[in-house]
Amino acid sequence: MADAEKAPVEVTQPRAEESTPQTGTVTSKAGFWKASFVNDPNELGRDLLTKALEFDEAQLERDSIKVRKKLDFIVLPMMMTTYMLSFLDKQTLNYSNAYGLQADTHMKGNDYSWVASALYFGWLVGAYPWNIILQRYPVGKLLGCMLFVWGTVCMLQAAVFSFSGFFAIRFFLGMLEACISPAFVILSSMLWTREEQALRTSFWLSTNGVSSILGALLAYGSGHAVNLAVPNWKLIYLIVGALTFAWGFVILIYLPDGPHNAKMLTEYEQMIAVWRVSKNRMGIKHRAIVKYHIKEALLDGKTYLLLAMGVATGILNGGVANFASSLIKGFGFDALRTSLLQTPGGAFELIGCMAFGWVATKKNMLGATVIISSLPGIIGLIGLLTISIKHRYALVAMCWLQNVLGAPIILGWTLPGVNTAGHTKRTTVIGLFFCFYCAGNIIGPHLFLATEAPRYFTAIKGLLGTYCALIFFQAIYTPLCYFDNKARDKKGLHAERVEEELLEGFDDLTDKENKHFRYKV
């Protein structure tokens, strides 16, 4: 019983009266870093799951609640803060536009639209390579290191004086930030069950709303600063970049690479964390690149529906995120008032993401929630088309509704993570998804024609059509997954023992190979 007494939490005896197994997790700092880069996460996960299965299931269920709360209250806030800074970096262009950015950098015509697209050109170039890198190397360590570089590049935006310089720096910023979203989709799939992921991912993306509020207030405050050595719009980049750089230290030290090495969990709790996510039938993370997984991803019809939805949400995001300031300013408000009026939009996004994320946790409601959460944006666009310029505050309210777009975006991001098994296949689908999402973000700003300012009717109609396309593709994707599940259920495709199904998830099988896998609809 000596080993049992070393367990970090009080546990009952394992089955067959065996002593409490030790996980073998390296606890020294040097060993922790070495293990992160050398050990295969999937093999570590299999070992931890094997030991977990020696315990009584009722005990595992009780202890899993404590583990989930630790992840929710320690890891999730770190992810939320990181994503908030990521979105704030992107939104700095929108806020600085109200303070003379275009005049100071000599932009003309559609130059601003190209600068808005530059970040997504960079993201497009970096999207797939980053997914390969994230499969092979520790997620937390990569993100921590990238925050230092990304914060520095954000501050460098204050040092450019021309359209070409601004385009170049935004391009490199996009290449760096391309790792954030796929990293969090992967990390969410490793730390939470498929039933939990929609709400958790909605939480970290909902910080876009917090970012919109803080960014608008930051822009408003910067606009009041006088006698500065630099223009007001440059101050925004310097502040946000410095915050990002400082936050990098927190992520580098504390953000886990998966449940197998989460420093905030004891060795026994790491075992429980792996047992929890084993129900996803996906294992943790396999570093080897399996070529036939790539082929299966490219031949799977569901992949192309996901890519179509990625383009649609990208077009919507590219338009809304970069032209909210221009729309509101065009209704007859000055720069300071424009910044302040964008603040409520952040609250709409925050509440919308959390509310729809909660609805998506209900049985068979993930796909339906993507469709339902698109309706506020559609209503807002119709309002922007039909309401007279005389009712400018009503038009501003229609702009606020566009911020609810965050809900269908993040729920759409959840789909390739929860419905694609096989680590190389999932990496391929997620990588392609974000490439297409970036392409959409490049297209979106160019719907806003400079000659149509301030109402941009062509853009509004284009975004309205894009929402309809998103709903159409989702209405095909969800029934396909549903009927595939029903077909597997009718065939009685289950292992003789639950333990066999859980361990099978660590065999790196794709969703088509693993007949015990069920799609989330």
Image: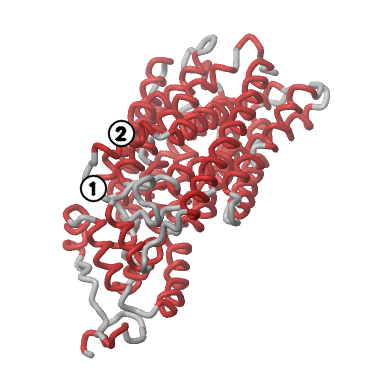
In the drawing, what numbered circle is on residue 513?
none
Across and down, in percent, residue 460 comes to: 66, 22
User: Of helix, strand and loop, which one carries label 2?
Assistant: helix
Q: Nearer the viewer, residue 419 or 103?
A: 419
Q: Residue at x 60, y 42 (%)?
A: 370
**For marks 1 and 2 on the same chain, the one whose residue lies earlier in the sequence:** 1
Report which residue position mark 1 lands on.
287
Task: Sort mark 2 into few (<14), some (14-19) or many (20+) by Cα contacts within 10 Å.
Answer: few
User: In the rendering, at what x and y percent does residue 517 appear?
Assistant: 41, 53
Which label is found at residue 295? 2
Q: Quadrant of the N terminus?
A: bottom left
Cα separation, mark 1 vs mark 2, equals 18 Å
Left or right of 378 on screen, residue 308: left
Q: Amino acid at mark 1?
A: Arg
Q: Nearer the viewer, mark 1 or mark 2?
A: 2
Q: Quadrant of residue 479?
A: top right
Label 2 amino acid? Lys
Is 266 left or right of 474, judged from the image as shown?
left
**Residue 125: x percent and y percent?**
34, 26
**Residue at (32, 39) in percent of width and height:** 131
**In this view, which residue lies farthest toward the front?**
491
Residue 287: tell me if it is visible: yes
Q: Is residue 4 above or below residue 278?
A: below
482, 270: nearer the viewer: 482
Element under disc 1: loop
